[in-house]
Amino acid sequence: MNAADESLLLGIDFGTSRTAIMSNRGLREVIRSVVGYPKDVIGLKLLGAPLLVGDEAYEKRSFLDLRYPLEDGVLREYSQRDVDVAHDLMRYVVGRAGGGEGLCAVIGVPARASNANKSALLRIAQDVLHTAMVVSEPFMVAYGQGKLMNALVIDIGAGTVDLCAMKGRMPAPEDQVTLTKAGHFIDECLQEALLERYPHVQMNLNVACAIKEAHAFVGPGQGPVEVALRAGGKPVTLEVGEQIRTACESVLPDIIENVKRLVEEFPPEDQAVVLQNIILAGGGSQIRGLADFITAELVDYGAVRVTAVADPIYDGCAGALKLAQELPPKYWSKLGHTTMET
Ligand SMILES: Nc1ncnc2c1ncn2[C@@H]1O[C@H](COP(=O)(O)OP(=O)(O)OP(=O)(O)O)[C@@H](O)[C@H]1O
Ligand SMILES: [Mg+2]
């Protein structure tokens, strides 16, 4: 039995909108990345607890102060309060795995998170874990898919789009890009476009996000999209296809520009293979027509194959867990990535 067999190993995808966790003992869970605190003593009495985490907190939001520890994919660090919230989320997430001695976790962070931000996350992890390593989210996806070289991962999350060129080594800073126009940005664009077209419709970001998650698409060839909304308190049915398409396409020019740049930076003899190995991941990979849209934009580059991962919720943390299992924690510090041992 080696060290990896004895430890409880975790893969954690610490995301802006949701955190996914898997363990080598079969845990597989996704938690909304939010912590709710009672607003006053009445709330505390109703709740019977000092805080709630995840969907339960979101559902009881009317009498809670909701805090999201991550913003644009990285830990909020404006105040000690932000750090405490992240701490509460991390403690809860790791607690789902049963806790105990010798817990080791590989944690995904945005591709270009600053060293200071990675260190802040590791300090938070320090209280609840024995050993932790942070790796970039798209690298985790690539590792999970066994695509370690001549591949390009595009992870479209809520706060960030992360791109990573896989060159058979741990990705260097120049192999990765983080863009902050992602899922939340699409929601904002959609809200704005709907209010412009239908000024009387009752709209907020939650409604815009729900419409997007049900109908998101890019490119031509989709029929009309009718949704049930409310205007002045009364139900209305509105056609929103064009607004959805425009909002979803708003994030694509930056993504495509960076895909082209990362492809060009591979050795010329490898570029044809890379173009056959473009992988879409993250919640945004479910936008219909996305692979075809990107393929069409790369028409001058020869044969291109863009595929989406099978499970956009768990594929990132499955890759993190695979890395934790295949590389015993005692070697983590040698990877040249930020690690911490207590
Ligand atoms: N079917 C869908 N079509 C389009 N977008 C979707 C769909 N389902 C979920 N999303 C969006 O995907 C985003 C969440 O993706 P994901 O869970 O990968 O993000 P995250 O990991 O929490 O964020 P980040 O990686 O930026 O920290 C949200 O913006 C969500 O609205
Ligand atoms: Mg993510």
Image (cartoon, helix red, strand yellow):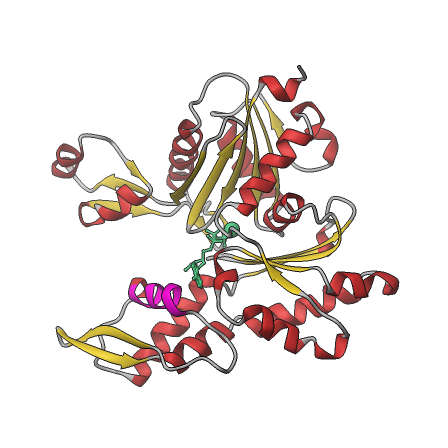
- Describe residue 275's horizontal placement relative to residue 80 as left or right: right
Q: Residue at x 52, y 55 (%)?
A: 282
User: Which quadrant holds residue 174?
Assistant: bottom right
Q: Is residue 244 magenta?
A: no
Q: Nearer the viewer, residue 256 or 326?
A: 326
User: Which quadrant holds residue 48?
Assistant: top left
In what quadrant of the picture does the C terminus appear? top right
Report the predominant secondary structure element of the magenta stretch. Answer: helix
Residue 117 appears in the figure: no
Q: Position of residue 234 (x, y in %)?
A: 12, 75
Q: Residue at x 20, y 42 (%)?
A: 39
In what quadrant of the picture does the N terminus appear? top right
Outermost residue to the right: 269
Q: Residue at x 46, y 57 (%)?
A: 158
Residue 5 appears in the figure: yes
Tell me if residue 264 comes above or below residue 90 in the rendering: below
